[in-house]
Amino acid sequence: MRAWALSLALLIMAGCGTQPVIHPQLARPPAPIDPKSLAKRLAAMQPGWPVARRVDCRHQKCVALTFDDGPGPYTGKLLDLLRARQVRATFFVLGQMVAADRGGHLVRRIVADGHELGNHSWNHPPLTGLADRRLRFQLKQTNELVERVTGVRMRMMRPPYGATNRRVADEAGREGLAQILWSIDTLDWHDPVPAIVARRASRARAGAIVLMHDVHRTTVQAVPTLLNVLEKKGCTPVTISELYGRTPQPGRTYMGR
């Protein structure tokens, strides 16, 4: 909790430093697609999708890698790196960024590569300061867009800036979402230096949830070094659901195993 509190304090002091750069004009959201047609398309891209993995984090040293605020201009490169190393992660996406991704190419590729998707709100406001109607919009609109684009119904969310309370948790639960916070904050928005980002992320121990942002080029550059260090430590990078051995329970809050 102390790590989370420090992260939130630094964010506030920095004037909400992780606020993503949003495209000035949003593309029209992609047209709805049939989930069965999407599954066939994804299977053609990667035979056997989705590929089940035998990961037991009760006995393996698992670390959940998470990336917020995308998809963005560096997400494709990150996906290339993760695919080359056969690594899976969880991407907490912004509805506004998904809408700006023409054709939904990146978010569909995230799914096709076996990664996990999470809801990070529509446009990154502190959810605790919103009226009920606006809070509901932030979660519901993002969930519905992602499901329309990918056929995937997201089951978890991360509140922007980690700002949450009982009202946010209750609304997340009504939307069928668990709240996922973190135990390791790389502060990659504050110190955009690959070596620093990799060093902070490398402090993760078994059961950790690592917070990063795929909208920063320097973060993507840090990933190969991070993966090398985790491998030397005998740690397996996993998705959030793999870390817990199940889909997190709606309405509950998780900070690491």
Image (cartoon, grey):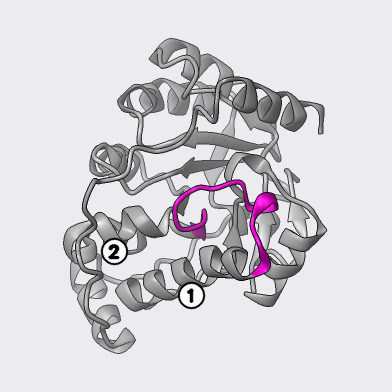
Q: Quadrant of the N terminus?
A: top right
For marks 2 and 1, give the CA distance. 13 Å
Question: Which one is in front, 93 or 221?
Answer: 93
Residue 217, horizontal then vertical, whole percent: 30, 26
Q: In the rendered image of this protein, does residue 174 appear above or below residue 238?
A: below
Contact check, label 2 and label 1, Cβ < 8 Å: no
Does residue 218 appear in the picture of this structure? yes
The residue sitting at 67% across, 45% down in the picture is: 181
Q: In the rendered image of this protein, does residue 125 appear above or below residue 85?
A: below
Q: Is residue 155 left or right of residue 208?
A: left
Does residue 62 appear in the picture of this structure? no
Identify which amino acid the numbered label 1 is placed on: Arg
Q: In the rendered image of this protein, does residue 48 appear above or below residue 36?
A: above
Identify which amino acid the numbered label 2 is placed on: Arg
Q: Which residues are magenta?
A: 118-132
Question: Which one is in front, 182 or 245?
Answer: 182
Element at label 1: loop
Residue 131 painted magenta: yes
Residue 250, horizontal then vertical, whole percent: 71, 69
Determine the main secondary structure of the stretch shown in magenta: loop
Picture disc at residue 153: 1
Question: Which one is in front, 152 or 174?
Answer: 174
Query: To which residue does mark 2 refer?
Result: 108
Q: Is residue 148 left or right of residue 248?
A: left
The residue sitting at 47% across, 42% down in the picture is: 67
Q: Quadrant of residue 209?
A: top right
- How dense is the environment of label 2, judged by Cα within 10 Å: few (below 14), some, or many (20 and up)? some
Residue 76 painted magenta: no
Residue 180, horizontal then vertical, whole percent: 66, 51
Residue 169, horizontal then vertical, whole percent: 75, 61
Element at label 2: helix
For the view shown, which residue lies furthest in the front direction? 131
